């Protein structure tokens, strides 16, 4: 093991698991009904809020345009405005629901930058708490998730419904 390596073994299912055909975001967006199974928490007019199936932390969400787009420059002005407004809304509602101490927000544009899904632009929103990183993933090869995905989904979806309606 390299001294300066950062390991994330809990994401092995994403890296080594069977890949679904097509775009994972488009596959979920195409569902008629939003649910924990398709991970869509909130559907706006041009973008969706979706939970990360392999989260770095509980509440790890993504803002994803409904239209399949590979880059920021492909967003229309309306799509971009809603995209970044939803990013702001998601952070605010996560603060209300989970009281994280901070957030990581980020985009990986292109495979070389680390994008796991380079063909569909998206924003990561990762809530952070003091002490949420520890030795378990590296030594024990176990990521401790304190809140299960379905509970995160329900709580965050309730925040969006309360704020914007269904």
Image: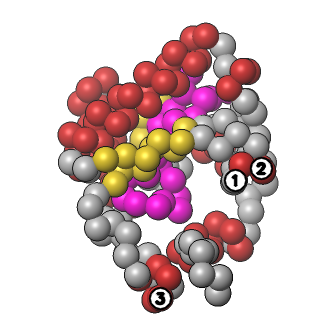
Q: Secondary structure at mark 3?
A: helix
| Residue at image point 47% right, 88% down | 139
User: Quick one: which residue is furthest to the front in this view?
Assistant: 3
Whole-number angstrom distance, CA of label 2 to CA of label 3: 28 Å
Whole-number angstrom distance, CA of label 1 to CA of label 3: 24 Å
Residue 45 in sight? no
From the image, tell me which residue sits under label 1. Answer: 114
74 left or right, relative to 127:
right
Q: Secondary structure at mark 1?
A: loop
Q: Position of residue 161 (x, y in %)?
A: 30, 32
Within the image, what quadrant is residue 93 found in? top left
Q: Residue 28 colored magenta?
A: no
**Number of residues whose C-alpha sits closer than 10 Å to that of mark 1, classed few (under 14), some (14–19) or many (20 or more):** few
Quarter of the rendering occupied by the C terminus: top left
Within the image, what quadrant is residue 28 found in? top right
Label disc, if present, on residue 139 of the rendered structure: 3
Q: Position of residue 61 (x, y in %)?
A: 46, 46
Label disc, if present, on residue 66 of the rendered structure: none
Whole-number angstrom distance, CA of label 2 to CA of label 1: 5 Å
Badge 2 vs badge 3, beta-carbon distance below 8 Å? no
- Mark toward the start of the polypeptide (2 vs 3): 2
Nearer-the-camera pick, 33 or 71? 71
């Amino acid at each position: 093991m390299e001294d300066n390596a950062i390991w994330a073994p809990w994401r092995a299912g994403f890296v080594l698991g069977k890949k679904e055909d097509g775009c994972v975001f488009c596959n979920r967006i195409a569902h008629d009904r939003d649910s924990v199974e398709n991970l869509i928490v909130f559907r706006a007019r041009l973008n969706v809020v979706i939970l990360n199936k392999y989260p770095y932390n509980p509440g790890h969400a993504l803002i994803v345009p409904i239209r399949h787009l590979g880059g920021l420059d492909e967003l229309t002005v309306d799509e971009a405005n809603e995209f970044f407004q939803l990013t702001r809304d998601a952070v605010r509602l996560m603060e209300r629901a989970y009281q994280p101490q901070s957030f990581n927000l980020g985009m990986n544009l292109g495979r070389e930058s680390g994008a796991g899904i380079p063909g569909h632009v998206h924003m990561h929103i990762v809530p952070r708490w003091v002490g949420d990183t520890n030795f378990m993933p590296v030594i024990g090869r176990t990521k401790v998730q304190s809140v299960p995905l379905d509970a995160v989904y329900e709580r965050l979806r309730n925040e969006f419904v309360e704020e914007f309606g269904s």
